[in-house]
Amino acid sequence: MTIHEAQQQVDIWIRQYGGGYFGELTNLGILTEEVGEMARWMVRKYGDQNLKPSEQQTDIKAAIEDEMTDILWVLLCLANQMEIDLTTSLEKNILKKTTRDHNRHINEQAK
Ligand SMILES: [Mg+2]
């Protein structure tokens, strides 16, 4: 699936099953919430936080994957409702990073 197809599929789903898009600020709040949900699992996998007894059987990688996809979903919603073509914007962003940072990381010493 391309990014363009993902934007189209989310748009179809929102119109068919979602009852329309939430407002942009609501979706910004939901995006923040989803980032927090991903962060919660990541601090348990990579950080110093421990799992609760009820979470011991959780597949953390699958949980992170699910939250990461929730983030992508909300970003796709925001892009659609703000008429942003993420394919074009990603291409521009890669070019910007390449132009600006092409030597930046290669010349850094490992810390
Ligand atoms: Mg979630």
Image: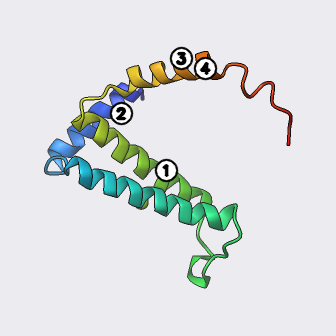
Q: Which of the 4 quarters of the picture holds residue 43?
A: bottom right
> What's the distance in space between the residues labelled 2 and 3, CA to CA?
22 Å
Amino acid type at circle 3 is: Leu
> What's the distance in space between the residues labelled 2 and 1, CA to CA?
15 Å
Answer above or below: position of 98 versus 70: above
Quarter of the image for the C terminus: give it: top right
Q: Of the numbered discs in the image, which one, if any, rests on residue 68?
A: 1
Answer few, some or many: residues within 10 Å of disc 1's Cα (few below 14, many 20 plus, some between 14 and 19): some
Q: Earlier in the sequence, mark 4 or mark 3?
A: 3
> Nearer the observer, disc 4 or disc 3?
4
The residue at the point 45 percent across, 25 percent down is 90
Q: Tell me residue 42's x, y (percent).
A: 61, 60
Amino acid type at circle 2 is: Ala
Task: Report the label total.
Answer: 4
In this view, which residue lies farthest toward the left?
19
* Disc 4 residue: CB within 8 Å of ligand 1: no
Q: Which residue is mark 4?
A: 100
* Disc 3 residue: CB within 8 Å of ligand 1: no
Q: Of the numbered discs in the image, which one, if any, rests on residue 95?
A: 3
Q: Tell me residue 83's x, y (percent).
A: 24, 29
Amino acid type at circle 1 is: Met
